[in-house]
Image (spheres, helix red, strand yellow):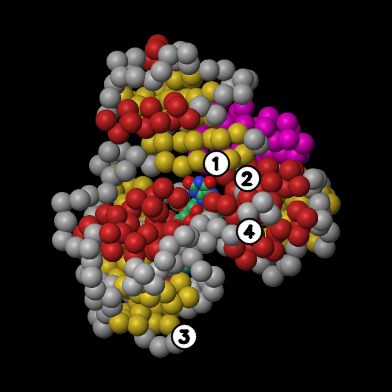
Amino acid sequence: MVVVGAGMAGVQTAVALREKGFGGPVTVLGAEPHPPYDRPPLSKALLLGTAESSAFDIDFATLSVRLRLGLDVTGLRPGARELDTARGPVPYDVLVIATGAEPITLPGTESLPAVHLLRTLDDAERLRPVLGRRQRVVVVGAGWIGAEFTTAAREAGCAVTVVEAAGRPLAGVLPAEVAAPMTGWYAECGADLLTDARVAGVEPGAVILADGRRLAADAVVVGIGARPATGWLAGSGIELGPDGAIVADERLRTSLPEVYAVGDCASFPSARYGERLLVHHWDNALQGPRTVAAQVVGETDEVYDPVPYFWSEQFGRFVQYAGHHADGDTLVWRGDPAESAWSVVWLRDGAPTALLAVDRPRDLAQGRKLIEAGARLDPERTADPSVPLRKA
Ligand code: FAD
């Protein structure tokens, strides 16, 4: 068994294989030189310096899992069942691809030392002094990473301006009416949010916007999304989707024999939602590996069709989302978004497809179970935040 990628999905694949009783050799290859670590703290405690490490608490030696770190896999030759690396070819019988995602850069700024991304431990370590020196920061993108970085930078005392090309935060993810209250969160924490604003260029000490505005900046943090890290698979013949993700089936098998894909790098068909999903969140990188391990040990009945889940800690709030909503779903509000805690539930034919909770973790826990069960909800009761969520 060879796993490419030593992030959450890769490491959990190795752990799940051992939990399922797989006794053969397991090797995990990872490009980063650091012991495998968890990414969510990078935009939270680790950035602020309130945590020193987010390394996984896993004893790989006891699990008999061989880690080969600082090793970039550059190619896959499925005919020979071999991977290419700078240290020579690596053969496999069964391969799991868990190479995650890589952040999208702002074209033309890649070599500028004041322009940062936030994906890796090295990125977070480069950003810590920016917070420590309370520098003036321009954040490009008001998505999940932009919001979390802004929260940390304001907490550290940085002056922060956020430049967002769309008319609101999280435009690609949430409908306008749900994102509307989140706009105010930026001002509340003392950050300037500029919507409908585009970056035209970055100069020493400043970000220039397309409308000519010039924003003073000691550092720039780009959080405009991530795409599956699959470039190294060019020429391998593996099927990739238009989004660059490896096309996996409901058992997380790829188009190549004995090759699986899991985590941020792979999309899978969801019978539950009737569409293919590409999920870039932690829980997917935890759950998917269990399905892969089950397939490898011959438990082939297991299919992967989760209710996706993620959380974000931003502006002193705990934001959680479970499920997957679509445009036609009916939105039901639970509570007033002007208050500190509220939720929204998306219903399709009376059954919940998704739920977003702001500081209402009980709604999330109950809603997630109802979504999993395919229960029907009474919209009127659902709209009453004083009544627990329960099936009709
Ligand atoms: P990754 O964690 O990206 O790991 C992939 C690994 O593969 C990387 O180490 C990479 O170097 C390696 N690799 C890539 N290509 C190669 C190659 N060719 N050869 C060898 N190795 C390779 N999700 C939430 O739900 N809640 C959160 O609060 C949250 N916060 C986050 C904060 C930050 C700053 C970031 C970046 C992500 C956050 N996420 C959060 C998302 C979550 O961390 C990811 O979904 C999860 O890490 C995906 O795991 P993965 O193993 O699929 O990919």
- Could you give the CA–CA distance between mark 3 and mark 1, rounded to whole angstroms? 37 Å
Which numbered disc covers residue 52? 4
Image location of residue 278, percent across then percent down: 39, 50
Q: Residue furthest front?
A: 62
The C terminus is located in which quarter?
top left
- Could you give the CA–CA distance between mark 2 and mark 4, rounded to whole angstroms? 18 Å
Q: Residue furthest bottom?
A: 88
Image location of residue 32, percent across then percent down: 52, 71
Q: Secondary structure at mark 2?
A: helix
Image depth: mark 3 or mark 4 in front: 4
Image depth: mark 1 or mark 4 in front: 4
In primary-sequence order, the first of circles 3 and 1 is 3
Residue 244: image quadrant is bottom left
Which numbered disc covers residue 312? 1
Q: Does the beta carbon at disc 2 come under 8 Å from ligand 1?
A: yes
Q: Is residue 382 above or below residue 32?
A: above
Whether 176 is among the magenta residues is yes
The N terminus is located in which quarter?
bottom left
Q: Residue at x 52, y 61 (%)?
A: 55
For mark 3, what is the residue? 86
Circle 3/circle 4 CB separation < 8 Å: no
Q: Residue at x 57, y 62 (%)?
A: 120
Categorize mark 2 by other alpha carbons within 10 Å: few (<14), some (14-19), many (20+).
many
Circle 2/circle 4 CB separation < 8 Å: no
Q: Is residue 61 above or below residue 216?
A: below
Whether 51 is among the magenta residues is no
Query: What's the amino acid at mark 3?
Result: Ala
Query: What's the amino acid at mark 4?
Result: Glu
Q: Residue at x 43, y 14 (%)?
A: 387
Q: Which residues are magenta?
A: 169-198
Which numbered disc covers residue 221? none
